[in-house]
Image (tube, grey):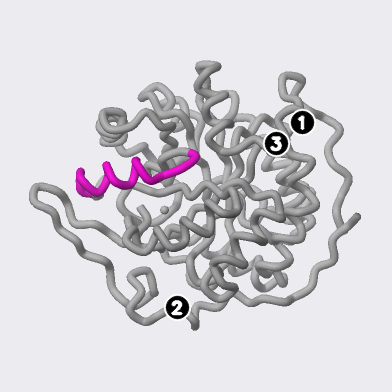
Amino acid sequence: MAFTLKASLSVSSSALPLRHPMRRGAGAVAVRAPGRPVVRPVDVVAAVTAPAPARRCASRSATSDRGLSVAEAMSRVRANGKTAFIPYITAGDPDLATTAEALRLLDSLGADVIELGLPFSDPSADGPVIQASAARALAAGATTDTVMSMLKEVTPELSCPVVIFSYFNPIVRRGAGSFAAAAKEAGVKGIIIPDLPYEEMYAFRKKAIKNNLELILLTTPATPLERMKEITKASEGFVYLVSVVGVTGARANVNPCVKDLLQEIRQVTDKAVAVGFGISTPEHVSQIAEWGSDGVIIGSAMVKQLGEANSPGEGLERLEVYAKSLKNALP
């Protein structure tokens, strides 16, 4: 059954408290611990339908893998001695029908987990590429409700789990319990909230657990050691290691400190660790895999393939070529 796009829930930044650390113009969170760097804004959690493509990777069974949790997906990859391929796209850019097709495509190409960004008007942790992508999606009419409706239709067809990347404002506007329940109904397996302060995480985590959602937390190069230990202990699905202090967006090189950070995290947890932010080339993903990361997350460069193409069809073609190049660079 094809979904119908209906504008029903806007995702404005107006409801975000003025004191909130990720509100634009409110200033950065600055928490200094002895001997550790200052924590920056991204360190706060720190955490219509077209026919489906006929092709399916022969080694992946959509029937047997359906319903796989994020932790289970990551464990399967690790057990096979592989590195997880985790692409990110923005829901609704250029439209939700294309997003649905992109999800099917990425799944067929061997994505182990897919991150889907919920478009928001004030994406403070994101760079210009994803900011522009979110603006296009909102202008095209994407809302929380229409994204969930699309996912409810598409996720049963996928062999990999979908994780929603959402700022806290859309969750607050809908109500944490209602949002978590809607995500569960839509087939979502995990959630990342980059502007949810760690100290405020527990209340939402209860709602997430009730709805079988894994709350994935972020740690960065600026996270104090003791806080990093707390984050890795609380994170579910995997630990999200942000490779840089700053916003999303492609960089020329991978931050060399990632290698040491991975080793540091390994000393305090045996959970899977995936690295994201600033990763855009086959050389990047190969380097991160060589350093021992369990997964590689590619966002802005992936979003560009869809959002900046001349047509949805061209965008899907570009996405396929690009995703294959990254997947093939992984062990």
How far from the left and from the top, in percent, is residue 134?
58, 65
Picture residue at 37% right of the left edge, 28% below the top? 270
Q: Amino acid at mark 3?
A: Asp
Rendered-image quadrant of the N terminus: bottom right
Q: Are marks 1 and 3 in contact (CB under 8 Å)?
A: yes
Distance from Cα at disc 1 to Cα at disc 3: 9 Å
Considering only order in the chain, which callout, 1 or 2, is on the residue closer to the N terminus? 2
Pair 2/3: label in front: 2
Among numbered discs 1 and 3, the one appearing first in the sequence? 1
Q: Residue furthest right?
A: 1
Asked if labels 1 and 2 touch by Cβ distance under 8 angstroms, the answer is no
Crowd around label 3: few <14 · some 14–19 · many ≥20 (10 Å): many
- Estimate how packed mark 2 is, as few (under 14), some (14 to 19) or many (20 or more) residues with alpha carbons within 10 Å: some
- Residue at point 37% right, 42% down? 241
Q: CA distance from mark 2 to mark 1?
A: 39 Å
Residue under pointer 3: 107
Q: Identify the element where label 3 is drawn.
A: helix
Number of the label disc, if any, that sits on residue 62: 1
State the residue at coordinates (63%, 77%): 10
Q: Amino acid at mark 1?
A: Ala
Q: Amino acid at mark 2?
A: Leu
- 270 to the left or right of 146: left
Measured in 3D between alpha carbons, the distance from the residue under mark 2 to the one under mark 3, in whole angstroms, is 34 Å
Q: Which numbered marker is on residue 293?
A: none
What residue range appears in magenta?
A: 224-237
Image quadrant where residue 292 sits: top left
Q: Mark 2 or mark 3: which comes first in sequence?
A: 2
Instruction: Label the magenta part by its dominant secondary structure.
Output: helix
User: Does residue 248 appear left or right of residue 183 in this picture?
Assistant: left
* Residue 298 x %, y %: 52, 42
Magenta run includes residue 229? yes
Residue 160 visible in this rendered orientation of the protein: yes
